[in-house]
Image (cartoon, grey):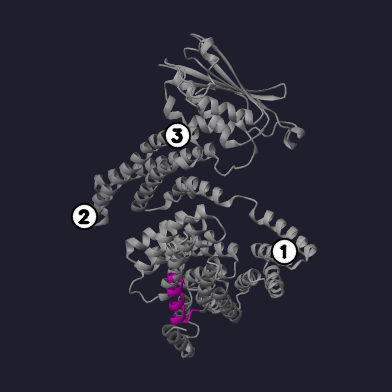
Amino acid sequence: MSDKLKELETKLRDMNPDEANSEARVDLLLEMAEEHFSGDDPQRLIELTNEALELAHRLNYPKGEAYGLWYEGLSCCFIADHERGLQRVDESRARLETMGDDIGVAKAIMLKANILRSIGSFDQALPGLYEALDFFQKCGDRYWEANCNYSLGLLYHEIRDYKQALEQHRKCIEVMKDLPERWLVARALNGVGQALNELEKHEEALHYHHRSLALFREIGHAMGEARALDDIGSIYMQLGDHELALPFHTKSLAIRKTIGQRRAQCTSLLNIAKVHVRQKNHARALEILDEALSIAEETKSKPHIYDAHHLISEACELQGDHKRALDHHKTSHHMKEEVFSENAADRIRKLQIGFEVQKAEKEAEIARLKNVELHEKNARLEELLRELRVTQSQLVQSEKMAAIGKLVAGVVHEMNTPIGASNSAIDVSDRCIKKIADLKETCESIEEMCANGQLESLLERVQNNQRITREANERISRILANLKTFIRLDDSEKKVVDLHEGLESVLALLESEYGDRVTIVKEYGQIPAVDCFPGEMNQVFMSVLTNAMEAIKGKGSITIRTLSKDGDVLVAISDTGPGIAPDIRQRLFDPAFSTKGNRVKAGMGLLTSLNIVQKHGGRIDTESEVGKGSTFTIVLPRVQTERDLRGNNQSSAYRPVRGAI
C-alpha cells in the first residue's frame, strides 16, 4: 500500500459522525478509488466504488454519481463484465457532459475505448484513444496522456503491429518522467519487453522485463510482479533454457494464488507444464495440467482449455498413452476450431482501415459539439482520408488498388466541398459571435441591445451558418455510408445480398465522375438476392461503370437494367459511347488490353471483373455496334434462399423503377 493510500485510509477512519453521510466522504472514497486505478487490489476498488456510488445517490450528489459510475465501469473491467462496464461508462459520460466536465468526458472516452479493446473491438477503440490522447496533450495532463499511450501500445500489440506498440510504450515512459505513478512506468517497461520479444530481440526484451520486475517489487505491486515473472520465464522458454524458466513461472504462480487471480493462475500452470513436458517429466506435467484444465473450465476460458488439452495430448503421446493422447487431441482440435476459426488478424486490419475513415463522423457527434470541436473533427477527417490514400495498397492486389485509387480521389473531391462549406460557416459564426459580444459591451442595457438592428442581422447569420454546417456534415455522413457499402470490408465470406444496394453505392461514389455530363437511367426489375462476395461484386460494377463513363465523350447516358431470366440474375449496363468494333471486342478480356482510341482503357480491369464473375459461376456477355454504344451484361446464377421459397422476392429493397437521374 502506498503512503498516500495509507494516509487516505486513516483519514476515512477518522471522519467524525457529521461527515459520515456527506459529499466530502464521497470525494474521499473516489480519491481512494483512483489510487487503485492500477488494479493492484480489484476487490478494494469495488468496495470503495459501491460505497461512494450508493452515498452519492442518497445525497443526490451529481459529481459523485458521475465519477462513481466511471469507477464502477473500471471495476467491471477487472471482473470481465464488459457489457455492464460499457453501460456504466456511457451513463458516466452523459452526466459529465451535462456538468460541462471536459476532463471527465475525456476519461470516459478513454475508459470506454479500453473496454472495447478488451472485447476485441479494435476498430472502435482506436479513434477513442486518439481522441482522448489529443485532449490530454492539449490540456497538459501528462499522467492521463501517458495512460492513453500505454493503452494504444496494448491495442497495437493485439493487432500485431509491434513496432507501433513499441513506440507507444516508449512514449508512455517518456511522458511519465518525474511523475509519481511509477506503476504505469513499470507496465510500460513490460510492454516494451513484450514488443521487443515479438520482434525477436530477446536479450533486449529480458532487460526491460527485469527493469519492470524490479520496479513492481519496489512499489509492492503484486499483480505486476507476477506478470513480469511470467514474461521472463516465457522468454527463457523460447531461448531453450527450461531450467532457468521454471523458477520464474513457479514464483509467478505463487503470487497469483495469493491474490486470487484464477485465470492468471491457469496461465502460470500451463507455462510450468510446458517446461516439464520439454524436460520429459511427463507425470509431473500431467498432474499440473489437470489442475490447469480444472481452472480453465471453471473460468470458462476457451483459449486456456485449448492449451490444456493440447499439452495433455502431447504429454500422453510422449508417455506412450496413445488412446488418451488421441482423446485430448480431438478435444483440443474442436476448441481450436471454435476459438481460432477466423483469421482475426487480417480481418482486424481491414476493419481498422475502413472504420478509421468513417468513425470521425459516426453517431452524429458533430451536431452537439462546439465550434472549436467541429474544427477538430474536420481536421481529423482530413487526416483519416490521407491515411486511406497512404494505406490503400494494403486492401487488395493491383487491380483493386487501381479502383480504390480512383475511389479515393472521388471521395476526397466530394468531401472537400462540404468540409470547405462547414469551415467557412464556422469562421463566419465566430466573427458574428465576436460582434455580438462587442455589441453587448457598447450597449448600456438589454433593451438597447435588442433595439439595435445589427443584433437581429447577426443572429440570423449565425442561424444560417448553423444550417450550412449541419447540411455539410449530413452530406459527409452520406458519402461515408456509401463508401462503407461499396467496400464491404467486413464481408470476408459469401453473403446473400441485394445487388441493387451495391449498384446504388457505386453510382453514389462515381457521381463526381459523371456529374451532369452522363445521365443515369435505372430500370430495376424484381430480382432475387444473390449469394456472392459483396465487395468483389461491387468492384465489378465499379469497373464496368467506369469503363462505360470513359467511353462517352461529351454528353450521353448509361442505362442499368436488372432482371431475372431462366434461373439467372442479369445486370445489363449500356452506354451511348462510340461502340466497339467486332475484332476489338474479341480481345476485350485479354490481359492488359487497351485500344489506342477512346473506348477501352481498363488495363486488367475487365479481365479481373470476368474472373470475379466466373468465380461466382457466372459470365459477362458483350454487345456493341459502332456508332451506337455498347452493353455489358453480368449474368449470375440465382440462388434459392428461404426468402425466395416463401415468395414475394423479399430480398430486394428496391421496387421496379424507370427514370433518369
What label does residue 425 carry, if any? Answer: none
Magenta span contains residue 101: no
Identity of the residue furthest to the right in this view: 323
Vertical comparison of 134 with 425: above or below? below
- Magenta stretch: give its range: 207-221
Q: CA distance from mark 3 to mark 1?
A: 51 Å
Query: Looking at the picture, which amino acid does disc 2 mark?
Result: Cys
Residue named by callout 3: 407
Tell me whether the residue at label 3 lies in contact with that at label 1, contact meaning CB atoms closer than 8 angstroms: no
Instruction: Identify which residue is drawn at 76% across, 34% down.
Output: 646
How many residues crowd mark 3 within 10 Å: few (<14), some (14–19), many (20+)? Answer: many
Give the residue number, with chain letter if any, for mark 2: 443
Q: What is the three-letter code of the residue carrying label 1?
A: Ser
Which badge, 2 or 1, is on the more N-terminal residue? 1
Observer-side mark, 3 or 1, equals 1
Q: Which mark is residue 313?
A: 1
Q: Is residue 211 in view from this perspective? A: yes
Position of residue 271 measured from the top left corner of the image (x, y, whole percent) = 61, 70
